[in-house]
Image: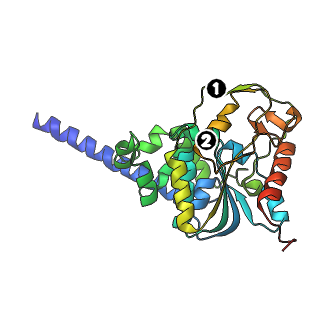
Amino acid sequence: MQKFLTLVAKILLTLLVLLMALDWAYTAVYLHSSHRGKVEKIFNSKAENFDVVILGSSRANNHFVPELFEKKGLKTFNYGMSGAHLFEASLMLKLMAERNYKIKTVILEADLGLCNEKESEMIAAKFLPYIHHSEVIKNHFSGQADFNELYYIPFYRYIDFDALIGFREMYQTATDKPTNILDNQGYHPLTSNKPGNMKNDIRALKPIRNKYYEEIKQICKQNNYNLITVMTPMCTNVKGLDYFEKANKIYPEIYNLENVVEGDQYFSSCGHMNDAGARMFTEVVINRFFETKQKQ
């Protein structure tokens, strides 16, 4: 019996050492990457200077064109991420502040995301390789139900989120396989000539006083970032458009720009403008909120 227990102990110890070694190896790869995605771009960066930083979901990623800001002399990057919630937007901004980014203005897309305080697993997983190397990330995830497993069990996070940060992504990161995520200063244009679903029903969504939006406001205040929070356009055939009015009752400071671009020809799907619509919308934002250097 003692021999059996000794054998089991040796197997478990060997397995633990193997998991620790794999964890170290995978993490080392991600710690040396800054070219494949927006999370690693920030985490592995030093202090940067921006006139404008854009945060939010795909409705930020697809709707704000940095090129048009740059033409006005405003150094800009779009850090919006498809699928992101305010949970991830807040963490992105915390990491920028930790790295002493100098940012004049943060534009935050906060409309449909106001209705929940959940993490977006497909985006949140991108932060997990760094959880042992950042108190900011550790603390941000500390309230999540699976925090203990993610933090204390070696290699668990890479297994649990294999499709997002597992072997394939690690290998592509190690070999520096290029992506288009950072092209166009982070802006992802939707250029398909075939429109998607031009109907949407958001009646079930209920905006709330959102913890992570409150965090973003506090971070901006502490770091002297000027915060402009906006709601971006949707197509005309939407049920439940009073959602935006309800959101404004909770947060009157959010600019409701939902109807500044109209016409299905400017949309790729009901919730996402195409490149033509995004350019029209970006011009509206620039003209409304920024003085161009040409006028100074």
**Left or right, residue 186 beside residue 225:** right
Labels 2 and 1: the sequence-earlier one: 1
Quadrant into which the C terminus falls? bottom right
Q: Is residue 291 visible?
A: yes
Q: Is residue 131 visible?
A: no
Q: Which of 66 and 248 is in front in this view?
A: 248
**Left or right, residue 255 beside residue 206:** right
Task: Tell me the residue at 64%/67% (across/down).
Answer: 103
Of marks 2 and 1, the one in the foreground: 2
Residue 260: quarter of image: top right
* Number of callouts: 2
Q: Which of 103 and 5 is in front in this view?
A: 103
Q: Which amino acid does label 2 sit on?
A: Lys
Q: Mark 1 points at which residue?
A: 203
**Left or right, residue 260 beside residue 28:** right
What coloring was used for the rendering? rainbow
C-alpha separation, residue under disc 2 versus residue under disc 1: 16 Å
Badge 1 element: loop
Q: Where is residue 171 drawn, in percent x and y?
A: 58, 49
Badge 2 local density, few (<14 within 10 Å), some, or many (20+)?
Answer: few
Task: Tell me the residue at 83%/67% (across/down).
Answer: 292
Q: Where is residue 161 drawn, in percent x and y?
A: 50, 39
Task: Tell me the residue at 76%/36% (across/down).
Answer: 234
Q: Where is residue 8 drawn, in percent x and y?
A: 22, 38
Residue 273: quarter of image: top right
Badge 2 element: helix
Q: Mark 2 points at which residue?
A: 249
